[in-house]
Amino acid sequence: MNELLSADLAIMLIEPSPTQRKIITKELQGEGILNIDFADSIADAKTQLVNNIPDLIISCLHLPDGNAADLQHHINHELSEYSIPFMLISSETRKAQLEVFKQSGVIAILPKPFNKLHLGKAINATLDILSPQELELDLYDVQDLRVLVVDDSRLARKHIRRVLTNLGVHRFSEAEDGAQAIEILQNDMFDLIVTDYNMPQVNGQELTETVRNSDEHAHIPILMVTSEANDTHLSNIMQSGVNALCDKPFEPDTVKKLIYQLLEQD
């Protein structure tokens, strides 16, 4: 398949402020993106989405008739067949306010104001999602990789699977938390575990410790996906036996590099 370029993207920008629309449009045009449709509310966006499915939706947090979480909920449930990448632009910095987006599989959360580097990374993540490129491994056939995805968010699991499927992975099992993952591991073997940190009952760190203390599974590489930012906390997570950490949102290029490193180690 031909490589998708940023200039090929069709974007819906949802922003009620004319000034902010102009600023964001200018930045998008600087990335070569000219196919941009605009909406100024959730209702307006829903109406347009009936007949026009974009490659990417970019939305501010606060809208006249709700917020971006309401819009994303509609997209994830009513338009789930299209798997539209969703990007949030917000000046919000409080973790609790942004966590819902990190857990729902957004492609990126850009600060407001954002710079060219922020936008470039987010656009590249979108292109990675839309342009499957199989991971080439020397020690494994990527299509035979057995991957256990552990996350209490169905949407997050779906996003992780989509990223990994684009790399050529097709053999998945899913668990809603660490406790369910431990049950699955009693009967099945895996080549890789991708797990969230924050989960009920048994969290990602406790799952990792259980795996590392298991005779059958101690060797399995573990990639932990977390929105934790505290250095001390991250250090404790790494000491539990995690092989690599990846931030939420789950960036495809970063994941590709991490998985290559994990699976190609002797």
Image (cartoon, helix red, strand yellow):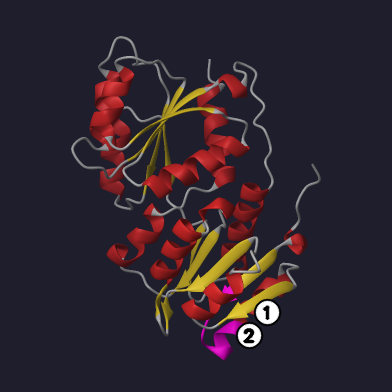
Quadrant assignment, res 120: bottom right
Disc 1 to disc 2, C-alpha distance: 6 Å
Tell me which amino acid carries mark 2. Answer: Lys
Q: Residue at point 40% right, 82% down?
A: 65
Tell me which amino acid carries mark 1. Answer: Lys
Provide residue 74's location: percent of width, then percent of height.
Answer: 45, 64
Quadrant assignment, res 208: top left
What residue sits right under mark 1 in the picture? 26
What residue sits right under mark 2 in the picture? 22
Provide residue 213's location: percent of width, then percent of height.
Answer: 25, 17
Region rendered in magenta:
13-22
User: Where 263 falls versus 92 (above or below)?
Assistant: above
Numbered marks: total: 2
Provide residue 83's location: percent of width, then percent of height.
Answer: 56, 53
Q: Residue at point 58% right, 59% down?
A: 122
Q: Residue at point 26% right, 22% down?
A: 183
